[in-house]
Image (cartoon, helix red, strand yellow):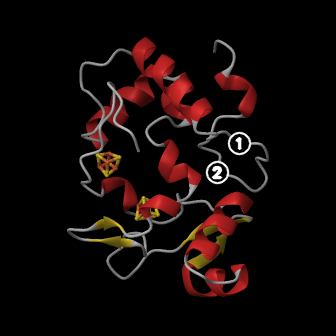
Amino acid sequence: MKNLPVFECTMCGQCCEGEGGIILGPHDLERISSGLKLCSEDFLKCYGVYRNGKWQIRTGDDGKCIFFREGAGCTVHPIRPDVCRAWPFFRGNMIDSESLYLAKDYCPGIRQDTTFEEFIAEGKAYLEENGLVASDPKTEGHALLPASSTKTAF
Ligand code: SF4
Ligand code: SF4
């Protein structure tokens, strides 16, 4: 991810921890499985888990994403899923200043003194520029904003 004034990842790995958040939409599945030279079925068998009607990346015994390595960070960084690319500009943080406040506490990469307005403006530009919007909420991460919302005011 290119460094943005309101956000610069410190690679602490906190957002790579825990079950359930790393949703694999159809584009993600194609990108990551072909990047690892696997067919989608084999990729999902090895690294996927189906939960609540969506495919997700599973965690390892340490409770972190199976692709996270201590000291190295994300081992699939160039082909990582859209939700990983979109953080911290998740739907909740973009519509609720309280959620952004909590996110600042959780993610050391978010500039502490950034205002909600700055965060939204930069987030919208970043999500749009990188195509990180949801077109099918049935298969894609709920955290991704729908395509229409990056073009309009909230
Ligand atoms: S929690 Fe924030 S700073 Fe830490 S790895 Fe995730 S995005 Fe980067
Ligand atoms: S794919 Fe990479 S960035 Fe996403 S949760 Fe896993 S290790 Fe973290």
Query: In the figure, 78 relative to 105: above or below?
Result: below
Classed neighbour count for the residue bearing mark 1: other residues with Cα under 10 Å, few (<14), some (14–19), many (≥20): many
Secondary structure category for the residue under label 2: loop
Task: Determine which residue is flagged by label 1.
Answer: 134
Q: Type of residue at label 1?
A: Ala
Q: Residue 69 appears at what percent x and percent y?
A: 30, 73
**Residue 57 vs residue 43, the one in the foreground:** 43
- Whether residues under marks 2 and 1 lie with C-beta atoms below 8 angstroms apart, the answer is yes
| Image quarter for ligand 2 | bottom left
The quarter of the rendered structure image containing the C terminus is top right
Q: Residue 99 appears at what percent x and percent y?
A: 44, 30
Q: Is residue 138 left or right of residue 113?
A: right
Q: Which mark is residue 112?
A: none
Query: In the figure, 116 relative to 25: above or below?
Result: above
Residue displayed at 62% across by 75% down = 33
**Residue 40 vs residue 56, the one in the foreground:** 40
Query: In the figure, 135 relative to 139: above or below?
Result: above
Q: Earlier in the sequence, mark 2 or mark 1?
A: 1
Classed neighbour count for the residue bearing mark 2: other residues with Cα under 10 Å, few (<14), some (14–19), many (≥20): many
Query: Which quadrant of the view contains residue 109?
Result: top left
Q: Is residue 25 visible?
A: no
Spatial CA span between label 2 and label 1: 7 Å
For label 1, being within 8 Å of ligand 2 is answered: no
Q: Is residue 108 left or right of residue 22?
A: left
Q: Residue 17 appears at what percent x and percent y?
A: 37, 62
Q: Is residue 92 visible?
A: yes
Residue displayed at 62% across by 31% down = 128
Residue displayed at 56% across by 25% down = 124
